[in-house]
Image (cartoon, rainbow, N blue to C red):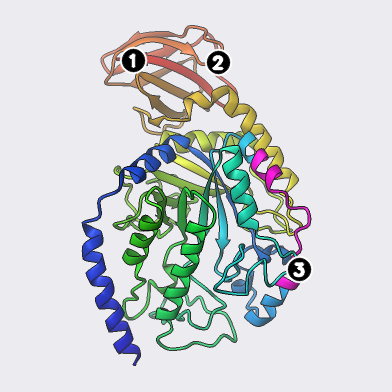
Amino acid sequence: MKKILTFALALAITSSALAQDQHTPSPENLASRQEFADSKFGIFLHWGIYSTFAQCEWYLHRGKINHQEYKKAADAFYPHRFNAKEWVAAIKDSGAKYITFTSRHHDGFSMWKSAYTEYDIADATPYKRDIIKELARECHKQGIRLHLYYSHVDWSRDDYPWPTVTKGHRNHRVPDRDHHDGGYANYYKFMNNQLTELLTKYGKIGAIWFDGYWDQRHNAEKFEWGLDEQYAMIHRLQPGCLIGNNSHIAALPGENFQIFERDLPGEHKGGHSSKEQTVSHKLPLETCQTMNKSWGYTVRDTNYKSLEYLIRYLVSTAGKGANLLLNIGPQPNGELPAAALERLKGMGEWMRKYGDTIYGTTAGDIAAQPWGVTTRKGDRLFVHIFDLKEKSLNLPLNCTVESAHVFDSKAPVKFTTTAEGVTLSFDEVPSGTDYIVELKTK
């Protein structure tokens, strides 16, 4: 029976995939891609009943918790200090242009009132409020785009198939959960019903952010997720809604931006991108990174990155032509951690002064160097200097430089044209978080 269902589903998916290969993005989708690429900075919010355990969003799996016992935490989830207006205002003040919110993580708990499950914040908790409804209303009111994270993986539903991984690969099972053969068809329908709710009840959604399909990737037999049909449904419901999938491989047809987890595009320096994940120059790029070390709230993790580090990371991401999606794990009471709010405030002060060198830019003419990075906007090239050891800087450029000045003070910077490009000369070694020189080029 299982093989028959799998074969039938595979046939449906294959025929749909052929149509998806012919998919042409709508004008609304292309406009959304440009808006997304220009925004450069967003805030990720990992929040769910896992915050009540204060041991990150993977606690159900890593703690080897019985999923029925884990679900009882919903009865204690009462985020009485949640204030959507304050959240969105603080995020907007940081200079971020969009929010990506975890509507449903791997534990299967839904952060909105869903007609397709009672395991949601409105039905399973004493709080009884629809978080996404309140967040969407404030985002629309304050001019912040709302993106929604949605997990394909579910550790709590019996109709989500357990992976049957090949030898040498990790099995992401949780204890004491039943498994029904052939259940994916039912689970697939459940997911699409929930995605339809999210795309029809809460106004314009900027993107659906999927978290990869690592869970079934090393199966002995290929697992068919039905992504092509699902993507087509999303584009049909909201043509301007982008789709990203944190798959750690090359983007698939129907995906509209490419995600890099804890890695700048193409660097492979300790994040989760693989060598298969080559950088697409046809799609907008996004790097997601944590503000401390954790995604979900973790009581022991107070190791927040410094403001200088975060600003430089944002600038470095823009230097790759990508967006930075910076994560915060809200507390179980509904507040954003004080350390996170402090970082948001500092980034906002910096962006109000220097945002012109970030928003609407593309990757600069010069790839990242030990001294810093570059960004470009039309005929303006911004040289972001983090760590220069001397009073001059050689820039290998193929364009002509007409003028150079310090971005904030407008003080002229001496430059000499060379066979390789230009050499900038300073009266003293540049210092500070980001010393920016603007070049007018042609």
Say which mark, if any, is on residue 126: 3
Say which mark, if any, is on residue 408: 2
Q: Specify whether residue 346 is painted magenta.
A: no
Which amino acid does the dot numbered 2 rest on? Asp
Say if mark 1 contacts mark 3, CB within 8 Å. Answer: no
Q: Specify whether residue 76 is painted magenta.
A: yes
Q: Name the residue under label 1.
A: 441
* Residue at the image point whose x is 48% and y is 37% from the top: 40
Query: Based on the displayed image, in which of its 4 quarters is residue 71 positioned?
Result: bottom right
Q: Sequence order check: which comes first, mark 1 or mark 3? A: 3
**Residue 62 can be seen, yes or no:** yes
Eye-nearest disc, 1 or 3: 3
Which amino acid does the dot numbered 1 rest on? Thr
**Residue 387 can be seen, yes or no:** no
* Quarter of the picture holding the C terminus: top left
Q: Position of residue 386 (x, y in %)?
A: 52, 28
Q: What crowding class fits label 1: few (fewer than 14 Cα within 10 Å), some (14-19), or many (20 or more)?
A: some
Q: Sequence order check: which comes first, mark 1 or mark 2? A: 2
Eye-nearest disc, 2 or 3: 3
* Residue at the image point whose x is 40% and y is 79% from the top: 185
Query: Based on the displayed image, in which of its 4 quarters is residue 409 positioned?
Result: top right
Q: Is residue 204 above or below residue 18?
A: above
What stretch of residues is rendered in magenta? Answer: 74-90
* Residue at the image point whose x is 24% and y is 77% from the top: 11
Q: Is residue 44 above or below residue 405?
A: below
Rounded to the nearest angstrom, the CA distance separating label 1 from label 3 is 60 Å
Which amino acid does the dot numbered 3 rest on? Pro
Q: Is residue 170 above or below residue 32?
A: below
Q: Where is residue 331 in the image (x, y as percent from the top left)?
A: 72, 56
* 86 and 163: which is toward the camera: 86
